[in-house]
Image (tube, rainbow, N blue to C red):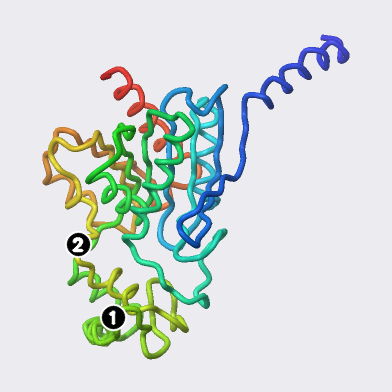
Amino acid sequence: MNKLIQLAVVAPLLALMSTLVSAQEITIKDHDLRLNAKLNIASESITDGPLVLLVHGTLAHNSMEIMANLQTLLEDESVNSLAINLSLGMDDRHGMYDCAVPHQHRHEDAMGEIALWIQWLKDQGVDKVLIAGHSRGGSQVAAYNQNPDAIVLGQVLVAPATWNAKAMAESYHRRYQKHLTDLIKVAQQQTINGWMPQATDFIYCNQAPKVKAASFLSYYNPPQTLNTPDLLIEGGLHTVVLAGSEDQVVRDLPAQLEVRELSNVEFILVDGADHYFRDLYSDDIVEAILDSIDTLVEGE
């Protein structure tokens, strides 16, 4: 084909594609905090088909590799998506959480922020949402979906967090050579809005300068379980759980799910995938999302 003819054909196609794909940052308010998210419109309108809301993992963000890959792959399938940044107590937060920043976030704060984003989507006219969460984000999604909004059709949980007090204490001691029970007692002795009295080993942060006592207790002595399998109930939302065979972070996830027989939960073990489902393993997540959308839309 003549080069001029090729350009004449390709240019309008590129222009058409640019009009169909729209990516923008959205900001909403949560009291004194601004929450932000990346909205990808891969169809003619935000209201076309179920939209996928994506929730990242511990101290992470919406542009990390797994989140960016999922938005790109969903875009290729003409599926709209919204990847949110959990504020973690910070105004208009972007990027990985800096351990030097005072920690005043709690695990359960995510549920309220997910609810705010669901309300924003409803305000835009969206009436069908599938929520997908990775790692701790998967646990937070499952906790939110104990009482989901009516527009939430289902959930896809990717390597969602597992948790039990004994394993957490052992892990903390291996990582920091300190007894977790001692620090829990220190946290319990502080006032309601008090800080830990000295620099504290917290989540991934070695000697974080400032940690709220309530934050420490939220992650290490929670009032409700942080174990994702315990949050899945018979007759609840349509749920797909994916685990990687090479995942060293939530190694007990497959064993926990295999002993639970829930008619609304599908478990997929992806051979070769690690905790972050890198490279082509993101395709397995998107396939599960697309299959869920097909099942849920056909079932209406």
Residue at image point 18% right, 34% down: 264
- Amino acid of disc 1: His
Q: How many C-alpha atoms fall within 10 Å of the one at disc 1: few (<14), some, or many (≥20)?
A: few
| Residue under the image location 38 percent in, 50 percent down | 134
Query: At 33% from the left edge and 21% from the top edge, which residue is drawn?
Result: 297
- The circle drawn on residue 224 is 2
Check disc 2 and report its element: helix, strand or loop. loop
Relative depth, front residue between 39 and 204: 39
On the rendered image, what quadrant is the N terminus found in?
top right
Mark 2 surroundings within 10 Å by alpha-carbon count, few (fewer than 14), some (14 through 19), many (20 or more): few
Using the image as rendered, state which of residue 128 and residue 290 is in the foreground. 128
Q: Position of residue 110 (x, y in %)?
A: 37, 56
Q: Quadrant of residue 186?
A: bottom left
Quadrant of the drawing holding the C terminus: top left
Look at the picture and state if 289 lies above or below 133: above
How far apart marks 2 and 1 lie (CA) works out to 22 Å
Q: Earlier in the sequence, mark 2 or mark 1?
A: 1
User: Which label sits in the foreground, 2 or 1?
Assistant: 2
Residue 39 shown left or right of residue 136 in the figure: right
> For mark 1, what is the residue?
173
The answer to whether residue 38 is above or below residue 78 is below
Type of amino acid at the residue the image marks with label 2: Gln
The x and y percentages for residue 7 are 83, 17
Query: Above or below — where is 2 with respect to 99?
Result: above
Secondary element type, mark 1: helix
Residue under the point 36% across and 85% down: 196
Which dot marks residue 297? none
Quadrant of residue 249 in the image? bottom left
Furthest toward the bottom, the residue is 197
Question: Quadrant of residue 103 in the image?
Answer: bottom left
Instruction: Point out residue 106 in the picture as x, y percentages from the top left corner.
Output: 35, 66
- Residue at the far front in the pictured view: 31
